[in-house]
Image: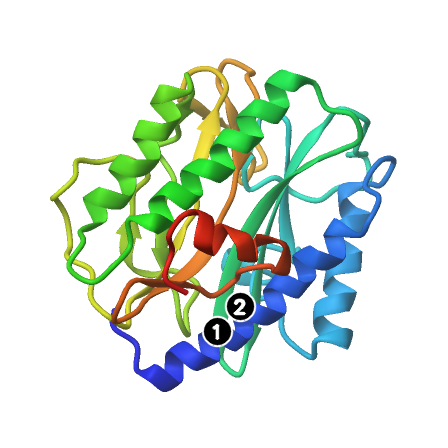
Amino acid sequence: MTKQPQEVALLAESGRLLASVFELLDRTSLVGMSTLQVNEIVEKFIVHDLQARPASKGQYGYGFVLNSSVNDVICHGIPSQSTVLRDGDIVNFDITLEKNGYIADSSKTYLVGEVNPLAKRLVKTTYEAMWMGIQAVRPGAQLGDIGWAIARHAKRNGYSVVREYCGHGIGREMHEAPQVLHFGKPGTGLALREGMVFTIEPMLNGGRRNVKAEADGWTVVTRDGSLSAQFEHTVAVTASGVSVLTLRHDEEDMIGKMKIVA
């Protein structure tokens, strides 16, 4: 679970490239675009512009470079020509990228056009919850501290945390130890040490936390039909705190705001 400094540096390069993929999507008008079109744009950018590999494509037999989870889809939504993004939707794009043998993983929930205040609040709170989890990362802290910080923020704001899916270690493989739960008790679980690299990727529901798997074998939705949002970063435990390897330029102010050690 512990990476050498040169491995963390390679993971950071993959993370930097992946951040640029989201910055491309930030500049893209999503209204009226199908999720399959977004998938094609991202694949072309990763392969041709970044000279990297979309790590999700072919993983576990999956045929696309990203997951596109719209509205009540919690995770693993499949890109489709028939799923067209409409004004008022929220959509999470979960993307992985491999460069020089090392994989980075990140996701972001986008507001499509004019989104109602309740959906905006869910997305905002989910983003904050991810950062609460990131802020808990430092040598000597424990995995339970991360989950507790996330779940506390969600509960305070009236949202539920999905428990069936969690963060994970990452490196040469997309999914490595440890599992990083988004709920838990402080002072419990595996102790963090310098060189660990893993994802923090909370999924918050506007209603109950219960999930339902669709017949396609991939798509997971809220059982009560409520909205769901997710954010994800790949992070590394450093000697003094945490480094966010997939940090985007627009997030640099979060480092100081949340007292994160870069």
76 or 117, nearer to the observer? 117
Left/right placement of residue 205 relative to residue 150 reads right
Q: Pointers 2 and 1 in contact (CB under 8 A)? A: yes
Image quadrant of residue 98?
Answer: bottom right
Query: Residue 90: which quarter of the image?
Result: top right
Q: In the rendering, which numbered label is found on residue 136?
A: none
User: In the rendered image of this protein, does residue 120 appear above or below residue 192?
Assistant: above
Q: Which residue is mark 1?
A: 12
Mark 2: secondary structure: helix
- Look at the image and tell me whether residue 119 can be seen: yes
Which sits in the foreground, 182 or 166?
182
Can you identify the residue that label 2 sits on?
A: 15
Residue 214 appears anywhere in the view: no
Label 2 neighbourhood size at 10 Å, few (<14), some (14-19), many (20+)? many
Which residue sits at x=50%, y=50%? 254
Residue 181 position, x and y percent, is 29, 42
Q: CA distance from mark 2 to mark 1?
A: 5 Å
Q: Nearer the viewer, residue 230 or 260?
A: 260
